[in-house]
Image: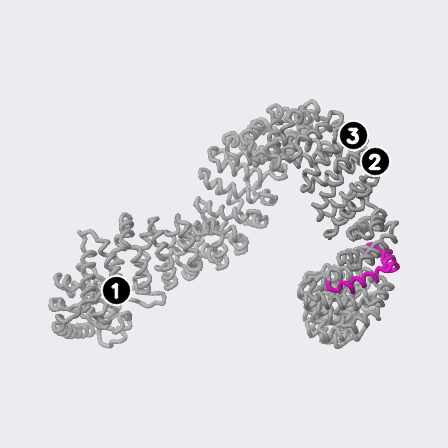
Amino acid sequence: MIKTKFKIDEGQCLTCGNQTHNVETNFFGRQKTSPLTIEGVAFHGRCLLCHPINPEILLSLNTESVKAPTGKVSSPVSQPDSHTEVHPKYEEDRHENSECSRKTNRISAAMGKLSSVLLESKRTKDTLPKESESDTDTGTNDCEESVAVTVVSEVTKEDAPAVSEVSVTDVSIEEALASLKSSTLSIKRKLNLHEVVSMMQKFPKSFKIQKHGLKALNTESKDIDNISPIISVGGVEVVIFAMKTHSSNNGIPELLLNILNNLAKDSSAKIKISDSGGIQEIMNILKLFPLNENIQLLGCKVIKDLIVGNAEVRTKVVGFGVVSLILEAMKNLIKSVEIQEKALLIFALLGKENTDIQLDISSNSGIEIILNSMTHFKKKSDVQEIGCSALKSFASENKDMIASLGGISIIINAMKLFLKNKVLLKNACGVLIVIAENRSNFCKEIVQEGGAKILLNAMHSHKTSKTLQEECLSLISSLSNENETCKKGIVEAGGVPIIVETMQCHQQCVGVQYQGCNALHSLSGAYSSTKAIIARNGGVEAIVRAMRLRPHVMEIQEQGCAALSTIILESEASEEKMIEAGGIEIIIEAIRAHSSSPEVLAPAFIALGVAACDNSKSTKLILKHGILDLIASALTNHRDIEPIRDAAWGALWCFAGTSMDCRLPTVACGGGLEPVLEGMRAHRHITSIQNEGILELSRVVKACTANIDSIALKGGICDILTAMQRHPSEAQVQENGCALLKNISFENADYIEAVALLDGCETVIQALITHKAVLSLQRQGCGVLLTLAHKNNFNKDKFILSGGINALVEAMEYHFGDLTFVIQAWCALKHLIKEGSGAMTDNSTSFLDIGFMMFANNTTKVPVKNEQDINAETVIDCMKGFIDFVGVQIIGCKVLSLLLKSKGTSPALAGTVKAVVYAMNHHENNTKLQEIGCDAIADLAYIHENYKFAIMDTGGIDAILAAMAMHSKHYRVQERACRALSHLASNSPSNKDLIANQGGITAILTAMKIHNVKLSVQESALAALWKIAANMSSNKVEIASSGGIKDIITAMNTFPDEVSLQKKGCGALWSLAFDNTYNQKQICYMGGTRSILMSMKTHLHNSGLQEQACAALLNLTSRNTQNQDEVVNEGGVQHIATAMSNHANVERVQERACETLWALTTSNQKARIVCFMSGVVKLVGKAMSIHTTSPNVQEQACWLLRNLIEEESIENVICTEEMRSLVDYAYTAYPNTCQKCCDYILRIIDMRLLVCSQSSRK
């Protein structure tokens, strides 16, 4: 019985043991059997040795035409549902008789059924209807086909002829299957692909035909020569259609995927599959069988073949959601190494240059799954290799995630385990390069994990691998770039000799030489010891050799120059080796060969400058090779490229820094001015030479003012003006020329006269007129104008006659938004008019008004910075003289404000305030003037206390309130007016009274109601209410009775995210609640407590707000048990504790927090319990330990502990040695404020500690 059961389980014949069925065990442990057809051995599960069939009958029967639709015979017993599979064990349990009896009964039943079928077949054979053109099998139902199959499988040899009479009702499908069978069974005959595809197209819904056709296509597609014919006859389309209609049938998905896997090896087939919807169908199959390892593996293979070398297919695959499906397969089938490898390979192919999939994989936990796969198969070389390749594809957008999930350690362990696998090492280096790029912390982690040593071991183990050496060198550069710890680790691990050896072994490899230079450049850093190691191991010679062998490779020349410049810096030994190796000649040749490449020129100039610095030998050698001509050419060709300019002038400076006998005449530094001036004279028509010459002269003047005399005596002024006159359309020449003329002629009457005689005034005015849109030129023009006109009436007349007034006015009109320039231009005009000819007096009024108007639309607060002062008296005189010109008044107010802010108090104090107030009263209908006037008063009141009294005495408060009443709809006026009232009321009880008595409180609250959605108005109004209410009982009452409390809370609730407004709101509530029980209740009743706590919650990390909020809560709860309960119930204690935790180092927060908690816990047991639960004791101890020098923090903390220690549950926490030492310190350090409460606390702590000590002894 056991042997019989074993044969059934193994799918063998019960009599002889031949294999007749294929047995598979699914994921859940259930077995399914499939009948086998093996020539001479078995026929559809029938053992031909025990139950032979006549060969002629085999051909005539075509038993495939009467098989069940699934193509499987599940058991010897016929079932109504052809898809039902019967497990052999189920059959054994179902029949109680022996195996022999069951077989005999089954054969008898089969023979009886065969007789019935044959008899019925003879009666109806001639009356069968012809098959329609339909694709479906209409002649035989599932039950009849199943019975027929069962009968055929059980018939004996003697009954075989009778079986030939069995047929199906669908004659067309029978014939098609017969044709297909004859085509596929014949070995000698070539398969007719067209016939197979046509048959599948004719009967697309016939499972039997589709299955035979797919088998045929699978066989043929294995030969690559057959792929094109299959495509040409429409094979791809029929396969895709079969996927849509039959993919859920057993055995079909594997067949379909096998065919696509074969076809996908052809590039044209990939496109055909993609265009025909094959990708979507593959995805559907994978979704349908998520736990089927074979299907998932085949699917991954197909996807991999499709995406190789085809970007369009890759895009489509990603669009159909392949990422999530593959990740799910990896997750579900983690034990399948083949699936892990194929999935990782797909990700490696998809992730390249595809940012979307990089983000997609991170959002689907893909990085974690990939790393889990590598961890699970850490001893599988292929998994590690492909995993590193996949991570490399995704690392650019996921470096943080890779590092946080331990990816660096996993990668380095893989390198350690498979040090002989070059591909793995290369991929691993690629991942680490991306991770380390611009991330110092990751670089350190790589080195700490032993990455540097493994990297160098890899280089040593694979000396002949160019690509691996290149990747390793690149990783060394990334690790050591601006990371001193990593540099040190690599150098100490012996990195320098290995790098040099690698460069020696691969002299002809461009990549190795470039990365080698880059690595040495990165390692050299600031350590002189490293530079010595590089020089001692032949690093300098290796760099020079690389540059010599590849003179036309820009990258090598760039990195070589950069490396040499760093290595020889402050290292005489390295510099000597460079000179001996011919490094200077190589650098100069690089400059010649790459004169159009900024990337090479800049480091080359720097290297030469470093070599020449304090080294006459190097300087002579450099100058001998004509470097100065090369630098001049570079400055001409690349004058807009700042790195080249900086490097070139730096090199020239270094050349000039040696002894005078080594300075050639072409060096424009120090006293060597002749080359610059001669060059400008010789090439006057070349703009770049003129501009660079002027810039060089400017640099010389800036470096040493003594050179001004040399420039003037050698004709430099004439050369500058000639350059400006010859190139009037070049803004850079004009701007640099004006700047240089200003520096040369500043406070030097002789040079001022020389400029004027050479038509310098006219040249400057022409530059201003021509380039009025260039602001920087206008600034320089005004500067030189002021310099030339200062105390020189002759030059003033020349400027006026040349149209200087109009030029400056036009410039101010064009640049009216730049306040600094307008002031500078006004300064120039003022000097021209003040002592100019009387012909200009008639136009002075209109001109000044235009000049003032330039400020009207500018609100920028910029301090005045000019050589010539604009004093307040001048502005006041202008405002008095032109009182009817509103533009003059507006700009006057602004300029006065700026002047006083930059200079503080002034002798014209009373006149300043009076001028502003008078202007506001005179133009009360002008909104803009009222806005600017209020702003000026606000600034004046903020600058100094003296201004507050002056404003009050001159009627400034009345003017502000009048402006608020007349321009109530203009929010800017209201905002500036509230700001002015806030500054006036600050620390001034008399102004507070005056503002309240004049109706200021009503005006402020009215502004808040009208402009309730304007943040600036609300913020300024809250600040004003805060200051007005502070320490003024009558003002507090008036604000509350006028609805101010509600307005304040409404403003805080309207703008919860504006921290500045919340501060001022808390401050206003703080002032209103202080020593005023009625206001305390009103604030609490109107939701003020919740608003304050919400503000604390919203702005956890703003210490200023936390301080103000705690102060407000302190005043709200002081001697008010009802408010205390509300604060506690609303979570106030927790918010205060959070503030203490977040701002432990902020003294004011700790002081206010402790004081507020003291007020809450004085008579409120619940508050004390909540304090204990919120960890307040620990926070108080921390505050006392941090702020030992703050008497206020120590005092408030001790009083809070005094309240908390009254609670028995809290006493244990406070009564510790640590807390005792803190309290004792406060007692000793601040006896005047802390002694009383500390004495009480210490007594309780000492008693408690004594009891504990005695208990422990017992």
Q: Nearer the observer, disc 1 or disc 2?
A: 2
Dominant SS of magenta comes to: helix
Question: Which amino acid lies under the numbered mark 3 shown in the image of this protein?
Answer: Tyr
Residue 659 % position (x, y): 70, 25
What is the span of residues highlighted in magenta in the rendered image?
Answer: 942-969
Is 1207 inside the magenta-drawn segment?
A: no
Locate the N terminus by quadrant.
bottom left
Q: Which residue is mark 2?
A: 791
| Label located before the other in sequence (1 or 3) | 1
- Which residue does the image show at 28% across and 73% down from the upper left? 90
The residue nearer to you, when weighing 19 against 781, is 781
How many numbered circles are shown?
A: 3
Q: CA distance from mark 1 to mark 2?
A: 109 Å
Q: Is residue 1143 visible?
A: no
Q: Is residue 982 above or below residue 732?
A: below
Q: Position of residue 622 (x, y in %)?
A: 61, 26
* Labels 1, 3: front one: 3
- Label 1 residue SS: loop
CA distance separating discs 1 and 3? 106 Å
> Type of residue at label 2?
Lys
Name the residue tied to disc 1: 206
Relative to residue 779, is residue 1062 depicted above or below? below
Magenta residue check for 959: yes
Picture residue at 75% right of the left edge, 36% below the top: 784
- For label 3, the residue is 751
Sort mark 1 into few (<14), some (14-19) or many (20+) by Cα contacts within 10 Å: some
